[in-house]
Amino acid sequence: MRAVDDLDSLLDLASRLARDAGALLLEGRASARVDDDNVATKTSPTDLVSDMDRASEKLLVEGLAQARPDDAILAEEGASREGSSGVRWVIDPLDGTINYLYGYPAWGVSIAAEVDGEGVVGVVYDPTRDELFSGVAGRGARCNDQTVRPSDATDLSQSLVATGFSYRPERRARQARMLATVLPAVRDIRRMGAATLDLCWVACGRVDAYYESGLQPWDLAAGAVIAAAAGARVEGLEGPVPQSGSVVAATPALVDPLRALLDEARASSPSELGDENG
């Protein structure tokens, strides 16, 4: 990995821009509705994008371009550019668009910095709780000013496990069949609808584990850095995170038994484990 002079400067920039985008989204939330004319579909009739997604992305991309014009950018709503610095920013300007449009308080802004393809800085801002999660590879993770760590869970049967489901009905049906194997083997399942927050909640112990696949790089990039920096094991189900689009993230003692359980569930209902987060 290419050396970067100051990871703290990347962290400070991402943190500032995430808060600015969160403030913009909070201001727009009062008038946002799922049936607005400015809400469009993407991969399916239930996969939506709004003007607020685009406005948040514009703020983030312009802020990054002004501060670091030589960096590359990959963003969910289409903004992308090549760079020459070795740094690439991976952005989800509004993770949890469905939640946002319904007024369900589980959505956020996600910004990661990669150096030569390796995630080094992650920032996720949850505006409804005013919680800024941040992590630097090898240096730990924080929520606002507090250091965070995963839970101490060691027994999968007593563990709270988060996951996500597809936008596509046929894949949802397969995932429901998989839950017939997973659910009886854990304490309970939670589905928030924002992969970035799921990973942050593993980082701070609000859930013991999280799994999903069919995700995009911007769904995973920042949260994976934060969870790993906090001390969680973060692994892909079919390859590296986030390139594979899949993740198992958990307090370390749970990863192997959870992977074994997921293998059993897939054997009984062959399919992908998830899809784009809702």
Image (cartoon, helix red, strand yellow):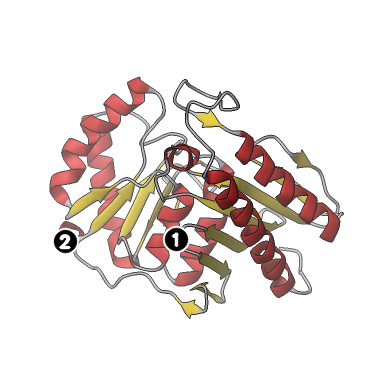
Tell me: residue 202, above or below residue 240: below
- SS assignment at label 1: helix
Q: Residue at x 40, y 24 (%)?
A: 168
Q: How far apart are marks 1 and 2 (CA)?
A: 20 Å
Task: Assign the N terminus to one quadrant of the image.
Answer: bottom right
What is the quadrant of residue 165 in the picture?
Answer: top left
Q: Residues within 10 Å of mark 1 (few under 14, many from 20)?
A: many
Q: Which of 5 and 124 is in front in this view?
A: 124
Going by the numbered disc 1, the residue's amino acid type is: Cys
Query: Residue at image x 77%, y 55%?
Result: 64
Residue located at (66% from left, 58% from top): 20
- Location of residue 125 by image quarter: bottom right
Residue located at (25% from left, 68% from top)? 153
Q: In this image, 276 relative to 272: left or right?
A: right
Res. 241 in view: no
Residue 204, image x, y percentages: 39, 68
The answer to whether 225 appears left or right of 104 in the picture is: right
Residue most extreme to the bottom: 146
Q: Residue 199: horizontal and vertical position, in percent?
A: 43, 56
- Identify the residue under disc 1: 200
Query: Where residue 158 is drawn, which disc sits there?
Result: 2
Q: Are marks 1 and 2 in contact (CB under 8 Å)?
A: no
Labels 1 and 2: the sequence-earlier one: 2
